[in-house]
Image (spheres, rainbow, N blue to C red):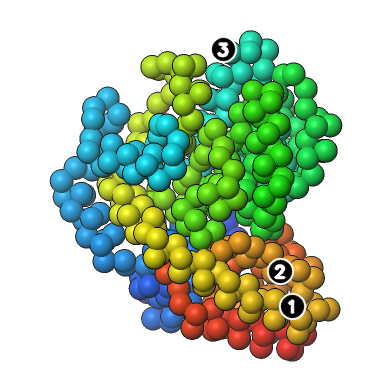
Amino acid sequence: MNSEYYFEKEKKYHLGVYRRSPVVFVSGEGPYLFDLEGEKYLDFLAGIAVNVLGYSFPPLVKAIQEEAAKLLHTSNLFYTLPQIELAERLIKISGLSKAFFVNSGAEANEVAMKVARFYGRRKHKKRFKFISFERSFHGRTLLTLAATGQKKFHQDLEPLPLGIAYAKLNDLQSVLEILDDEVCAIIVEPVQGEGGVYPSSKEFLQGLRELCDREDILLIFDEVQCGMGRTGSFFAFQHFGVKPDLVTLAKGLGGGLPIGCCLLDEKVLPFLHPGDQGSTFGGNPVCARSACVVCDEVSKESFLKKVGEKGDYLKKELEGLQKKYPGLIKEVRGVGLMWGIEIPGRAKEAAQKLFESKVLVNACNDDVVRLLPPLIIEEEHIDLVVNALDKILATW
Ligand SMILES: *Cc1c(COP(=O)(O)O)cnc(C)c1O
């Protein structure tokens, strides 16, 4: 059966909510994916920042196979080893106090926001509001959609949960303007992803930290996309040198298996009680074992240093492209191995052309080509992608 056969079958049986590229992937190796016809693609999207160790990373495959043969699932009514070992790793790396596991980024943010509500209600009685940011993305549940500062995601879903207002990233004054004494938390992506790759400034995050300390408001960093080594530090907050009270992880955490996590500062613990939160699958043995392997790899100093170096190289190459095509590329932005190339009104077309040259990227809106390669890429892979884009832009 060829790809066309499966396109038709999918159309017949699966809900048509995805705008998929016309390719069926069946295997992967390192930063490459292979389709049903055996064609090879260089992946600079990594399952949307998920496959941080690329495909078929042997220690990861082995750990998952072994754990799957031992124990798939028990529920959280019992203790299991991988979950405890993963919590220990994440707490030691982050310097936060406790970990709680779920299955996705949206769920991790739901947990963080519910913790903030508990803190606001139980400590300050009337506090329940959130400040979020324009262009942010926090997930697809109703609460995390409400926190998402992009109108297109709210269409026809109103009324969304109340009490969320949006400030402008890197504009502390805009936060002060909507702040009132009912705000329990500020939620921010240290590097906005879906919205078009907009990094926060260090000064801005420091400003939020000071504000939150002064008012006893919780600071939530959504690191679902920008965490797990992407910035060249394990956590994005370590890159910026600003410690949040709650941090969420998901995408890259399991290296390809679904697991999310909320890490919590000590200060919230007195306001949380047994029964406040739960998850059937959260932190299940196979996903948690996989995440342990990812944490061990990504937390190595040598690994993170290389991400930083490759990030510098990618930055230099993209800035070179921008100089070459100033009329087409408005800006290049990013940190580490998370980059946006702003090509106003033609980002989708650029992503489509790259796809035709067997390079996978994605377009945010129609303005930004987003690069989220596996963290194990080498300079040669960066050269391949930059050259492919160069060739496309040369014809425009
Ligand atoms: C992808 C993403 C989410 C949602 O994660 P899911 O696993 O799809 O629920 C939340 N926040 C950010 C910053 C993301 O990039």
Helix, strand or loop status at disc 3: helix
Report whether residue 6 is seen.
no
Give the residue pinned by disc 3. 122
Give the residue pinned by disc 2. 332
Report whether residue 52 is seen.
yes
Q: Amino acid at mark 3?
A: Arg
Q: Nearer the viewer, residue 39 or 41?
A: 41
Q: Amino acid at mark 1?
A: Gln
Q: Amino acid at mark 2?
A: Val
Above or below — where is 230 with respect to 157?
Answer: below
Residue at position x 40%, y 64% from top?
A: 303
Above or below — where is 283 with respect to 395?
Answer: above
Q: In the figure, is residue 7 to the left or right of 130?
A: left
Number of other residues with Cα within 10 Å of mark 3, as a class: few under 14, some 14 to 19, many 20 or more: some
Q: CA distance from mark 1 to mark 2?
A: 7 Å
Q: In the figure, is residue 342 to the left or right of 144?
A: right
Q: In the figure, is residue 342 to the left or right of 52?
A: right
Give the residue pinned by disc 1. 322
Number of other residues with Cα within 10 Å of mark 2, as a class: few under 14, some 14 to 19, many 20 or more: many
Residue behind label 2 places its C-beta within 8 angstroms of ligand 1 = no
Count numbered badges in the picture.
Answer: 3
Query: Which x, y percent locates residue 268?
Result: 50, 23
Residue at position x 62%, y 65% from top?
A: 339
Query: Which x, y percent locates residue 144?
Result: 61, 36
Residue at position x 44%, y 43% from top?
A: 94
Q: Nearer the viewer, residue 23 or 230?
A: 230
Residue 182 occupies quadrant: top right
Query: In terms of sequence position, does the residue under pointer 2 or pointer 3 come before the other?
Result: 3
Query: Which x, y percent locates residue 353?
Result: 64, 79
Q: Mark 1 touching mark 2, by CB under 8 A?
A: yes
Q: Mark 2 touching mark 3, by CB under 8 A?
A: no
